[in-house]
Image: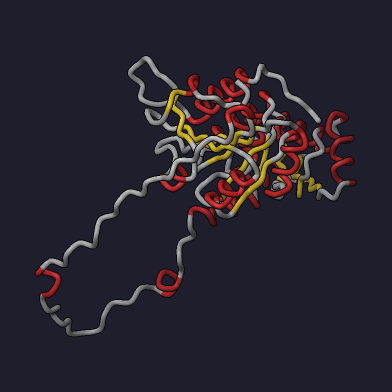
Protein backbone atom coordinates (compact mmCIF):
# COMPACT_ATOMS: atom_id res chain seq x y z
CA UNK A 1 0.00 0.00 0.00
CA UNK A 2 1.31 3.44 -0.88
CA UNK A 3 2.23 5.68 2.06
CA UNK A 4 0.68 8.72 0.37
CA UNK A 5 -2.81 7.13 0.40
CA UNK A 6 -2.55 6.35 4.08
CA UNK A 7 -1.85 9.91 5.13
CA UNK A 8 0.62 10.84 7.87
CA UNK A 9 1.22 8.25 10.53
CA UNK A 10 -0.11 9.19 13.96
CA UNK A 11 2.57 10.01 16.50
CA UNK A 12 2.18 8.53 19.94
CA UNK A 13 2.59 10.73 22.94
CA UNK A 14 5.29 9.09 25.05
CA UNK A 15 4.59 8.37 28.67
CA UNK A 16 7.25 9.48 31.10
CA UNK A 17 8.09 7.14 33.98
CA UNK A 18 7.37 8.54 37.40
CA UNK A 19 10.60 9.17 39.29
CA UNK A 20 11.15 8.36 42.93
CA UNK A 21 11.32 11.06 45.51
CA UNK A 22 14.38 11.74 47.63
CA UNK A 23 15.10 9.28 50.35
CA UNK A 24 14.46 10.32 53.90
CA UNK A 25 17.54 11.10 55.94
CA UNK A 26 18.36 8.51 58.55
CA UNK A 27 18.58 9.41 62.23
CA UNK A 28 22.17 8.27 62.27
CA UNK A 29 23.14 11.05 59.83
CA UNK A 30 21.85 13.68 62.30
CA UNK A 31 24.18 12.66 65.11
CA UNK A 32 26.94 15.15 65.95
CA UNK A 33 30.35 14.45 64.43
CA UNK A 34 33.20 13.92 66.88
CA UNK A 35 35.96 16.46 66.52
CA UNK A 36 39.42 15.24 65.68
CA UNK A 37 42.26 16.85 67.54
CA UNK A 38 45.37 17.38 65.52
CA UNK A 39 46.25 18.33 61.99
CA UNK A 40 44.17 16.69 59.29
CA UNK A 41 46.05 14.65 56.76
CA UNK A 42 46.54 16.35 53.42
CA UNK A 43 46.75 14.65 50.08
CA UNK A 44 49.92 15.14 48.08
CA UNK A 45 49.71 18.16 45.80
CA UNK A 46 49.46 16.20 42.53
CA UNK A 47 46.55 14.12 43.88
CA UNK A 48 44.78 16.92 45.69
CA UNK A 49 44.43 19.12 42.60
CA UNK A 50 44.48 16.62 39.77
CA UNK A 51 41.11 15.51 38.35
CA UNK A 52 40.79 12.31 36.39
CA UNK A 53 39.71 12.71 32.76
CA UNK A 54 36.20 11.65 31.84
CA UNK A 55 35.50 8.77 29.46
CA UNK A 56 34.52 11.23 26.72
CA UNK A 57 37.77 13.19 27.16
CA UNK A 58 39.76 9.96 27.00
CA UNK A 59 37.97 8.88 23.82
CA UNK A 60 38.60 12.28 22.21
CA UNK A 61 42.30 12.07 23.08
CA UNK A 62 42.47 8.60 21.55
CA UNK A 63 40.84 9.85 18.35
CA UNK A 64 43.24 12.82 18.11
CA UNK A 65 46.31 10.57 18.63
CA UNK A 66 45.11 7.47 16.82
CA UNK A 67 47.77 5.13 15.47
CA UNK A 68 47.62 2.44 12.83
CA UNK A 69 50.51 0.04 12.32
CA UNK A 70 51.43 -2.98 10.29
CA UNK A 71 52.47 -3.06 6.64
CA UNK A 72 49.07 -3.97 5.22
CA UNK A 73 47.09 -1.48 7.31
CA UNK A 74 49.37 1.49 6.63
CA UNK A 75 49.75 0.66 2.93
CA UNK A 76 45.96 0.47 2.56
CA UNK A 77 45.65 3.92 4.19
CA UNK A 78 48.31 5.32 1.86
CA UNK A 79 46.67 3.88 -1.24
CA UNK A 80 43.29 5.32 -0.16
CA UNK A 81 45.03 8.73 0.25
CA UNK A 82 43.73 8.97 3.80
CA UNK A 83 45.03 12.03 5.63
CA UNK A 84 47.89 10.98 7.91
CA UNK A 85 49.63 13.40 10.26
CA UNK A 86 52.88 11.47 10.65
CA UNK A 87 54.52 8.21 9.58
CA UNK A 88 57.37 6.47 11.39
CA UNK A 89 59.13 3.90 9.21
CA UNK A 90 62.32 1.82 9.37
CA UNK A 91 65.02 2.21 6.70
CA UNK A 92 64.39 -0.99 4.76
CA UNK A 93 60.73 -0.03 4.18
CA UNK A 94 61.55 3.63 3.57
CA UNK A 95 63.42 2.67 0.41
CA UNK A 96 61.31 -0.32 -0.55
CA UNK A 97 59.79 0.15 -4.01
CA UNK A 98 56.32 -0.86 -2.81
CA UNK A 99 56.26 1.87 -0.16
CA UNK A 100 58.58 4.57 -1.55
CA UNK A 101 56.11 6.01 -4.07
CA UNK A 102 53.23 6.01 -1.60
CA UNK A 103 55.35 7.58 1.15
CA UNK A 104 56.52 10.37 -1.16
CA UNK A 105 52.93 11.01 -2.27
CA UNK A 106 51.84 11.24 1.37
CA UNK A 107 54.71 13.64 2.07
CA UNK A 108 53.49 15.84 -0.80
CA UNK A 109 50.06 15.93 0.88
CA UNK A 110 51.63 17.25 4.10
CA UNK A 111 52.42 14.07 6.03
CA UNK A 112 55.63 14.14 8.09
CA UNK A 113 57.83 11.10 7.34
CA UNK A 114 60.28 10.03 10.07
CA UNK A 115 62.93 7.38 9.45
CA UNK A 116 63.42 5.61 12.81
CA UNK A 117 64.59 2.31 14.29
CA UNK A 118 62.57 -0.55 15.72
CA UNK A 119 63.12 0.63 19.29
CA UNK A 120 61.21 3.84 18.60
CA UNK A 121 58.37 1.90 16.98
CA UNK A 122 58.22 -0.44 19.97
CA UNK A 123 57.82 2.59 22.23
CA UNK A 124 55.03 4.05 20.07
CA UNK A 125 53.04 0.82 19.88
CA UNK A 126 53.87 -0.44 23.40
CA UNK A 127 55.48 -3.53 21.99
CA UNK A 128 52.81 -4.46 19.44
CA UNK A 129 53.61 -6.11 16.10
CA UNK A 130 54.20 -3.00 13.97
CA UNK A 131 56.18 -4.71 11.15
CA UNK A 132 58.41 -1.64 10.75
CA UNK A 133 55.84 1.10 10.08
CA UNK A 134 53.45 3.20 12.19
CA UNK A 135 51.16 6.06 11.12
CA UNK A 136 49.21 8.67 13.06
CA UNK A 137 45.75 9.10 11.56
CA UNK A 138 44.37 12.62 11.27
CA UNK A 139 41.07 13.15 13.13
CA UNK A 140 38.13 12.04 11.02
CA UNK A 141 36.30 14.89 9.29
CA UNK A 142 32.63 14.59 10.17
CA UNK A 143 29.97 16.02 7.91
CA UNK A 144 27.63 18.77 9.08
CA UNK A 145 24.31 17.37 10.35
CA UNK A 146 22.10 19.63 8.22
CA UNK A 147 24.24 18.92 5.16
CA UNK A 148 23.90 15.18 5.78
CA UNK A 149 20.09 15.44 5.79
CA UNK A 150 20.04 17.58 2.64
CA UNK A 151 22.47 15.27 0.87
CA UNK A 152 20.49 12.15 1.85
CA UNK A 153 17.23 13.61 0.56
CA UNK A 154 18.92 14.68 -2.68
CA UNK A 155 20.42 11.24 -3.26
CA UNK A 156 17.31 9.17 -2.69
CA UNK A 157 13.53 9.64 -2.65
CA UNK A 158 13.20 7.60 0.56
CA UNK A 159 16.58 7.90 2.35
CA UNK A 160 17.72 5.74 5.24
CA UNK A 161 19.93 7.12 7.99
CA UNK A 162 21.41 5.01 10.79
CA UNK A 163 21.59 6.62 14.24
CA UNK A 164 23.89 5.30 16.98
CA UNK A 165 23.02 5.47 20.67
CA UNK A 166 25.80 4.75 23.21
CA UNK A 167 27.78 2.14 21.26
CA UNK A 168 31.29 2.03 22.70
CA UNK A 169 32.80 -0.93 20.84
CA UNK A 170 34.68 0.25 17.72
CA UNK A 171 34.32 -3.20 16.14
CA UNK A 172 30.54 -2.95 16.37
CA UNK A 173 30.53 0.57 14.93
CA UNK A 174 32.82 -0.42 12.08
CA UNK A 175 30.62 -3.42 11.24
CA UNK A 176 27.48 -1.25 11.28
CA UNK A 177 29.09 1.29 8.94
CA UNK A 178 30.17 -1.45 6.54
CA UNK A 179 26.69 -3.03 6.50
CA UNK A 180 24.87 0.31 6.14
CA UNK A 181 27.00 1.34 3.17
CA UNK A 182 26.65 -2.08 1.56
CA UNK A 183 22.84 -1.99 1.72
CA UNK A 184 22.71 1.56 0.35
CA UNK A 185 21.94 3.72 3.41
CA UNK A 186 22.66 7.40 2.93
CA UNK A 187 24.60 8.09 6.13
CA UNK A 188 25.08 7.65 9.84
CA UNK A 189 24.68 9.93 12.87
CA UNK A 190 26.82 9.70 16.01
CA UNK A 191 26.36 11.55 19.32
CA UNK A 192 29.47 13.18 20.78
CA UNK A 193 29.02 11.69 24.26
CA UNK A 194 29.06 8.05 25.40
CA UNK A 195 29.69 6.74 21.88
CA UNK A 196 32.93 5.73 20.18
CA UNK A 197 34.07 7.97 17.35
CA UNK A 198 35.62 7.05 14.02
CA UNK A 199 38.99 5.62 15.07
CA UNK A 200 41.55 3.52 13.22
CA UNK A 201 39.87 0.36 14.52
CA UNK A 202 36.54 1.52 13.12
CA UNK A 203 38.21 2.31 9.79
CA UNK A 204 39.83 -1.12 9.67
CA UNK A 205 36.59 -3.00 10.42
CA UNK A 206 34.62 -0.84 7.97
CA UNK A 207 36.99 -2.12 5.26
CA UNK A 208 36.91 0.92 2.99
CA UNK A 209 33.20 1.77 3.42
CA UNK A 210 34.07 5.14 4.98
CA UNK A 211 35.45 6.35 1.67
CA UNK A 212 31.88 6.31 0.29
CA UNK A 213 29.77 6.92 3.39
CA UNK A 214 28.87 10.16 5.18
CA UNK A 215 28.93 10.43 8.99
CA UNK A 216 27.73 13.37 11.07
CA UNK A 217 28.33 13.95 14.77
CA UNK A 218 25.80 15.81 16.94
CA UNK A 219 25.95 17.31 20.42
CA UNK A 220 22.36 16.50 21.41
CA UNK A 221 20.95 13.24 20.05
CA UNK A 222 17.38 13.94 21.20
CA UNK A 223 17.32 17.27 19.38
CA UNK A 224 18.76 15.61 16.28
CA UNK A 225 15.96 13.03 16.31
CA UNK A 226 13.35 15.79 16.50
CA UNK A 227 15.04 17.64 13.63
CA UNK A 228 14.91 14.44 11.57
CA UNK A 229 11.17 14.20 12.22
CA UNK A 230 10.71 17.76 11.02
CA UNK A 231 12.63 16.83 7.87
CA UNK A 232 10.12 14.03 7.18
CA UNK A 233 11.91 11.03 8.67
CA UNK A 234 10.18 8.40 10.78
CA UNK A 235 12.31 7.22 13.68
CA UNK A 236 12.43 3.51 14.46
CA UNK A 237 14.38 2.20 17.44
CA UNK A 238 15.53 -1.39 17.84
CA UNK A 239 14.60 -2.77 21.25
CA UNK A 240 14.88 -6.42 22.29
CA UNK A 241 11.49 -7.82 23.34
CA UNK A 242 9.71 -4.46 22.97
CA UNK A 243 7.58 -2.84 20.32
CA UNK A 244 6.14 -4.42 17.21
CA UNK A 245 7.73 -7.15 15.15
CA UNK A 246 9.98 -5.74 12.44
CA UNK A 247 8.56 -7.80 9.57
CA UNK A 248 5.03 -6.58 10.41
CA UNK A 249 6.04 -2.90 10.24
CA UNK A 250 5.83 -0.75 7.12
CA UNK A 251 9.38 0.58 6.81
CA UNK A 252 9.00 2.44 3.53
CA UNK A 253 9.50 6.18 3.30
CA UNK A 254 12.32 8.21 4.88
CA UNK A 255 13.63 6.19 7.83
CA UNK A 256 15.93 6.91 10.75
CA UNK A 257 17.02 3.60 12.31
CA UNK A 258 18.34 3.90 15.88
CA UNK A 259 20.71 1.18 17.13
CA UNK A 260 21.31 0.94 20.88
CA UNK A 261 24.33 -0.03 22.92
CA UNK A 262 25.73 -3.54 23.21
CA UNK A 263 24.53 -4.19 26.76
CA UNK A 264 21.66 -1.88 27.67
CA UNK A 265 20.09 -1.12 24.29
CA UNK A 266 18.37 2.21 23.72
CA UNK A 267 18.32 4.72 26.55
CA UNK A 268 14.89 5.67 27.91
CA UNK A 269 15.30 9.22 26.62
CA UNK A 270 16.05 7.98 23.10
CA UNK A 271 13.06 5.62 23.23
CA UNK A 272 10.77 8.55 23.99
CA UNK A 273 11.91 10.29 20.82
CA UNK A 274 11.27 7.25 18.61
CA UNK A 275 8.01 7.00 16.66
CA UNK A 276 8.03 3.20 16.95
CA UNK A 277 10.10 0.54 18.68
CA UNK A 278 10.96 -2.55 16.65
CA UNK A 279 11.82 -6.04 17.84
CA UNK A 280 13.46 -8.91 15.97
CA UNK A 281 11.68 -12.23 16.63
CA UNK A 282 13.98 -14.79 18.28
CA UNK A 283 13.23 -18.50 18.65
CA UNK A 284 16.16 -19.55 20.82
CA UNK A 285 17.03 -18.91 24.44
CA UNK A 286 19.42 -16.03 23.66
CA UNK A 287 17.56 -12.89 24.82
CA UNK A 288 19.17 -10.36 22.48
CA UNK A 289 21.52 -9.89 19.55
CA UNK A 290 24.81 -8.11 19.10
CA UNK A 291 24.32 -4.47 18.08
CA UNK A 292 25.92 -4.88 14.66
CA UNK A 293 23.91 -8.06 13.97
CA UNK A 294 20.64 -6.33 14.96
CA UNK A 295 21.55 -3.44 12.67
CA UNK A 296 22.25 -5.81 9.76
CA UNK A 297 18.93 -7.65 10.16
CA UNK A 298 16.99 -4.39 10.47
CA UNK A 299 18.66 -2.84 7.42
CA UNK A 300 18.01 -6.00 5.42
CA UNK A 301 14.29 -5.83 6.26
CA UNK A 302 14.12 -2.12 5.37
CA UNK A 303 15.65 -2.63 1.95
CA UNK A 304 13.81 -5.92 1.37
CA UNK A 305 10.52 -4.04 1.65
CA UNK A 306 11.83 -1.54 -0.92
CA UNK A 307 12.88 -4.27 -3.33
CA UNK A 308 16.54 -3.24 -2.93
CA UNK A 309 15.97 -0.43 -5.45
CA UNK A 310 17.88 2.74 -4.64
CA UNK A 311 16.38 5.59 -6.63
CA UNK A 312 18.85 8.37 -7.43
CA UNK A 313 17.47 11.74 -8.47
Name above or below for residue 161 compared with residue 192. above
Of residues 306 and 64, the one nearer the viewer is: 306
Q: Is residue 204 left or right of residue 115?
A: left
Name above or below for residue 296 compared with residue 121. above
Of residues 265 and 118, the one nearer the viewer is: 265
| Residue pictured at 86% horizontal, 36% vertical | 102
Asked where in the image residue 284 lies, by quadrant, the reply is top left
| Residue pictured at 85% horizontal, 31% vertical | 96
Measured as percent of width and height from the top left, residue 60 is found at 59, 53
Measured as percent of width and height from the top left, residue 145 is found at 68, 48
| Number of residue marks | 0
Q: Is residue 82 left or right of residue 198?
A: right
Q: Is residue 26 left or right of residue 91?
A: left
Of residues 38 and 26, the one nearer the viewer is: 26
Visible in this render: residue 136? no
Of residues 155 and 209, the one nearer the viewer is: 155
Measured as percent of width and height from the top left, residue 109 is found at 87, 47
Which of the image's four quarters has the C terminus?
top right
| Residue pictured at 50% horizontal, 24% vertical | 249
Name above or below for residue 136 compared with residue 299. below
Amino acid sequence: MDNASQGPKPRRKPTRPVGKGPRASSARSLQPIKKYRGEPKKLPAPLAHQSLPSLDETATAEEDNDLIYGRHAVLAALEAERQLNRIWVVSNLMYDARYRIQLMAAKARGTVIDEVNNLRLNQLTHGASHQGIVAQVAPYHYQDFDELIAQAKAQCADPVLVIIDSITDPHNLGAIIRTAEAFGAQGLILPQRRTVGVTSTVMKVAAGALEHFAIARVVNLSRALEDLKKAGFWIYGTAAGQGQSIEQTDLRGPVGLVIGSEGEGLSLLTQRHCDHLLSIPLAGKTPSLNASVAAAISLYEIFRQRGFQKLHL
